[in-house]
Structure formats: structure tokens, C-alpha cells
Image: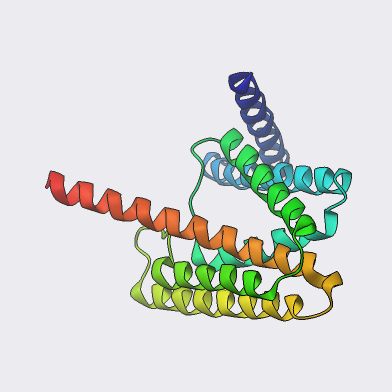
Amino acid sequence: MMETARLWLDTAISLSADRLAEWSLRNKPDADLFEIYRFVFAALLQLAAVYGTILILSACLHVFFEAVLWIAFFLAGRHWAGGAHARTRTGCFLLSVAVSLGCAVLARLLPGNVLLTGAVSLVSIVLVFVAAPSDILPGTSEKDLRRKRIWARSEIVAAAAAAVSLSAQASSWSSAAYAACFGSFSAAVSCFIAWQHERRSADSKTGAA
């Protein structure tokens, strides 16, 4: 079943990306540009599939607002801090949907607690300060690394402050506070996992040398 789902998703995205790339270059065929367009469209279609599914299912579960907040805070953190990637598109799809909906439902169910929000936010800050930026492209300059590090740390502190501030409001804001907090936490954990993987890879190369 899983293998069938993986093949179906990969095939659907690949074929759609091919068609969109061909249509975009219909008046100026170029093999190099085609590969670039194909890659971009595949990435956009993957994002649309993931977040479209999250929004639809969250609406069915009556946690749409929490899911939107989770997505916003997760993407903001992920943009600057970087993060781990699943090995396959299907893995990325299933993991993203499961984590986001799980966090959204949990945010709705948990009673308001500013101490819990603060504790989770503090862990997120520590993880980002230790690991960010991760998933860095080869050849990235030290200047760009410093810039990403500063922005990643600034973003996670601002996100933590926003989550704690929401949690300190009336109890009706508790689900929003948790959703924001869990979105930042998910991004921070992803960043830390990617950092650990990079360290292990570096150690393996050093050992092999």
C-alpha cells in the first residue's frame, strides 16, 4: 500500500511538473531551462499537495485556525534555520501532514498554560541557537552563514515571545499560543536533526580520510 502511494505521488508530481515545464517553454525550448523549470514546478506541486492536504483535513477536524498558525510559524522558522528532509516525497508528505495535524489537534485540546508554552519555546530557542543554520548549500559564504544564523535566532526569539504573549492572554487564545509554539518547535527539532546528520556525515568523512 505504501509503495503504491509513493509511486502514485511521485508519478503524479513528475508528470505534472513535466507538462508545466513544457508549457512554460513552448515558445523557446531549452534543455537546461527545462530541467530548472521542472525542478521548480515539482517543488511547488509538492508544497501545494502537502499544505493543501493539511488545510483541507484541518478544516474537517475543526482545527483550521490552529493549522494555519502552525504552518506560518513552522515555515518562518524553517526558512532561516533550515531543517531535515525526508528521503522520499511520500515520506515528506505523510510526516508533514501527521505532525501538523497532530500539533493542531493537541493545541486545541490542551488547557491554557503559560508555563508549558514558555518551556516548549525555551527548548526551541536552545535548539536553534545550537544548530542553526542547518541544511546549508555547498559553497555558502561565511557572511551568508552569519546572516542566516542571526535571522534564525532573531526569528525563534520573536516567535517564542509571540507564543508566550498569546498564552498570557485570555484562555480563548490558548490554542493559538500552542499552535504558534508547536510550529516553532517543529521547525527547531527539524533544524537540530539536520545539524546532527551533518555532524555525523562530517565525522564519517573524517574517519574515512
Lateral position of residue 101 relative to residue 122, left or right: right
Residue 154, picture quadrant:
bottom right
Above or below for 4 versus 105: above
Residue shown at 30% from the left, 55% from the top: 199
Residue shown at 73% from the left, 39% from the top: 23
Q: Quadrant of the N terminus?
A: top right
Estimate the x, y position of residue 148 in percent, counting from the top left.
47, 73
Q: How is the image coloured?
A: rainbow
Residue 120, picture quadrant:
bottom right
In the image, 50 versus 184, the foreground residue is 184
Above or below for 93 versus 64: above
Residue 70, picture quadrant:
bottom right
Estimate the x, y position of residue 112 in percent, counting from the top left.
76, 69
In the image, 206 versus 176, the foreground residue is 176
Residue shown at 57% from the left, 36% from the top: 91
Residue shown at 77% from the left, 42% from the top: 53
- Residue 200: tell me if it is visible: yes
Lateral position of residue 130 relative to residue 117, left or right: left
